[in-house]
Image (spheres, grey):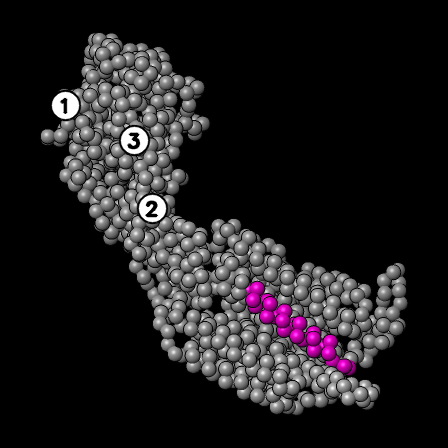
Amino acid sequence: MTRDRNREMLALIPVALLLTAGFAAVFAQENSKLGNLSLTYGAYFFAVCLATHIYLRIRLPHADPYLFPLMAVLTAFGLVMIYRIDESLARDQANWFVFGLILFALTIQFLRDYEVLERYRYIIATIGILLLLAPRLPGIGEQVNGAYLGVKIGPISFQPAEFAKLAIVVFLASYLRENREVLIVGARRVLGVTLPPIKHFGPMLVVWGATMLLLVFIRDLGSSLMFFAAFLALLYVATGRFSFVVIGMALFLLGSWFIVSTVPHVHDRVEVWLHPYHDPTESGYQILQSIFAQADGGLFGKGFGQGLITIPGHPNNALLPAAQTDTIYSLIVNELGLFGACGLIATYLLITARGFKVALLANDGFSKLLATGLTAVFAIQAFVIIGGVTRVIPLTGVTLPFVSYGGSSIVANFVLLALLLLVSDRARREAEEGASRAERGEPLGALT
Amino acid sequence: MNRQIIKLFGFIVVLFAILIGFTSWWSVFDAKALKEQNVNKRPLFEQQQIPRGRILAADGTVIAKSIPKGKGTGKRYVRHYPTGALFGHPIGYSFMEQGQTEFEQYHNAELTGEESEFGSILGELTGQKQEGEQIVTSLDPKAQEVAMGDLEAAGYGAVVAIDPSTGAVKVLASNPGYNPNRIPDKLKEWNQQKVRTPLYNRATQASFPPGSTFKVVTAAAGLESGVITPETTINAPGSITDEGHELANDYNQDWGSISLDTALTNSVNTWFAQLGQKVGQDDLFATMEKFGFNSKPPIDLPEEELSKSGVYDYESGTYLGRNDPVDLARVAIGQERLLATPLQIAMVAAAVANGGKLMKPQIWKRVVNVDGGVTKKMDPTVYSEPISGKTAEELTTAMEGVVDEGTGTNAAISGVPVAGKTGTAETPNNKECGGGEAENQAWFMGFAPADHPKIAIAATVSCTEQFGGDVAAPIFRDVAEAILAGE
């Protein structure tokens, strides 16, 4: 529908302006003079977004008009922040952005009938699990800060968990679509608690076990939490049983408590979270510096490009460790203040709202669950990392979607966006067709 | 499923609200406490990025300035002190790793431009960078140079010179001094030094037995309480017995019945000891406290770097008050456990010089912002009124006698009437001096011109075998001349 697409195009203009203004601010800070380079960057970014928009106009005319501009806002924001940290990283990120859009277009091109995913759900689940375990494989696995999150094959290194989250959500959406009735109908009340039938309890336990195994293997509380929370969110939406969520939560807490007390690295992460001042210069350094950076931001922040990332005079000593990835949110609070942070969180909330809107409009169970799962995993990922750097939960190495530096993250999230738009396009097209048929007095049943 | 999706959205709204809650807590509500955390070095690093304001002497000489180093985000400012060791005290230093001391620390807010919160928020909104303000002091480099030169020649010691009518501090010298530019390399070494400690400000942190300079305070208490008038005579024998011990005059000289002028001019111990007993502990301590004893001096230096003056009990580590048992006769002549900082003695001289009104001593004169506008000016304020104008006049007359014909003739300036008082306290086994037997703490305090005082000065020399009139009075004279020449 062209009206939607016009809205999308109009929404992209402020994005390009934001990017231009952001680059201009960084330039002004670094060189004390304004070149026209910022304008070039803005124009380049706008051109790429416009091309994507035209592609969407042709391929998915009915898709939600706000999702792409909202994600472009985040990308623009991330690019400016990364540019401000390190020019060469921003160039990489810009390349990944273009590559992400290519994969985005390819996904839309070849997965128009995304139900095909249901047919391969066990293959997809296996790929997902393998991706998650890959960082532990000798030769290609990479350990960062004690957690196994990266894989390095030749010159290319990536974070398989970013792609695994898509696979797991697709699998869960498909599995729950098929089994949701049984899970609801077969449920029994035992001691006032609704329990799923024993037969179907198995898969739940399997997911739980897989999560726990994941925690032991990759030693990353954040990713484990993200996967399990996405699973519980989907389970809840599919069955409508809140008790399942409570049981799942209890199982997760019990399991992770056990693992925290036995696996040293995970234990350390929790210790640092609870008592950061015990070792302020070593293990507690990152979280404390993250919080100190926020304290310095105040309401309005210090301004783009004005925050300290390294110790002055010692460019190799980080004052805010992993500013381009883990703690990018702290840098945002430092430079743009609480207001800037609220704007960022509001953007994530708007994306979440649009994502759930897609799920609400979708007509079939798989589409609904897929849109819900993709949106939930996206929102929870944002929560896990922002919660980590604000000491709501232990800090872990998850990226801030579309904002943090990292090719895997941006590419995987663009595929996530493509899937959401695919679901959205079909749902809204069917809704419109339904509406126009109703206007013409045709029976709605003809829809199927 | 739609109902659950909406509920799930509600749950995510709650999660995000928690994130905003925590962010607000760290960035706004708890921010102040976090910035004060010891392990938080960020504020210190950030200060290095602000061009810290210059510190100027009264004549415009640059005492401290900031020099940019590095580029881009690594750019920082490093403090440089063009006058080197001249103003090591009382300006102190400011370096990222070594921290701040003295004037640099006390005036940090102005020097970094953090003065008004409103201004900085406005600055943030308009994108203006924080910049430090410049402080002009009343310090007189020429007189400071004279003071440092004389002190170096004499040994350890300190000189404090105050404009009695405003409290403006013109000289605050302490020897041995140090060159603040060398702090980054030398701080550790200097801190470990046991004798000749250069970082110790002998003018404000050190307190010494004031000796006979304190007789001016005793006389002030006597006149002010009405116990004596300038005409009252007291019999002053060669020695008296006080609390079972002999208290004698120099050479056991018997002065007979004399009045204040003669007693002060010749610094007669037995006369002032008896006056102290007549005045009583209550009135003597009341007068002392009005002059500033038993309190930290009200100068613009960090409180932890200032010492009180008073009767200090080593055993309890406290300054004694009017109800504590003291040997009053010996307190009255500046002995017993009495200790005073050179700043305190200068304050006594300044109060007498200013007709009895003690002005708050202040080093800073005005704060000038980046655009050259004066944002704050030192407003001379009365700290206390220890004595009446009449008492001050009577004391001045007696103190003029000291310089004209008494122990302080070396302080005389040709063509300018000078009022003053010498002091010599015996300090045997002083660790600071290396434990010699014949060590004295020599003093001179006074003001000039006596009829229209422009400057009040206290000069002291430690570890000397000479008397106040021989070693401290000439320092007074030189510094006073330098200041009066610049007027």
Residues at marks 3 and 1, CA–CA distance in whole angstroms:
22 Å
Q: Is residue A141 magenta?
A: no
Name the subunit of mark 3: B
Q: In which quarter of the image is residue B404?
A: top left
Determine whether the residue tagged by mark 2 lies in a helix, strand or loop.
strand
User: What quarter of the picture does the C terminus of chain B occupy?
Assistant: top left
B470 displayed left or right of A36: left
- Residue at 44% x, 60% y is B124
Q: Mark 1 = which residue?
A: B404
The amino acid on which the numbered mark 3 sits, given as a three-letter code, is Met
For disc 3, the neighbor class at 10 Å (few under 14, some 14 to 19, many from 20) is many
Mark 2 vs mark 3: which is more N-terminal?
A: 3
Q: Nearer the viewer, mark 2 or mark 3?
A: 2
Residue B340 against residue A143 in the figure, above or below: above
Q: Mark 3 = which residue?
A: B347
Residue B351 against residue B98 in the figure, above or below: above
Residue A21 on image: x %, y %: 45, 73
Residue A395 on image: x %, y %: 60, 63
Residue B377 on image: x %, y %: 31, 44
Mark 2 vs mark 1: which is more N-terminal?
A: 2
Answer whether labels 2 and 1 touch (C-beta < 8 Å).
Answer: no
Q: Does the magenta stretch include residue A359?
A: yes
Q: Mark 2 = which residue?
A: B376
Which residues make up the magenta segment? A341-364
Mark 3 vs mark 1: which is more N-terminal?
A: 3
Determine whether the residue tagged by mark 3 lies in a helix, strand or loop.
helix
The amino acid on which the numbered mark 1 sits, given as a three-letter code, is Asp
Q: Can residue B429 be seen at all in this image of the molecule?
A: no
The amino acid on which the numbered mark 2 sits, given as a three-letter code, is Lys
For disc 2, the neighbor class at 10 Å (few under 14, some 14 to 19, many from 20) is few
Q: Which of B120 and A296 is in front in this view?
A: B120
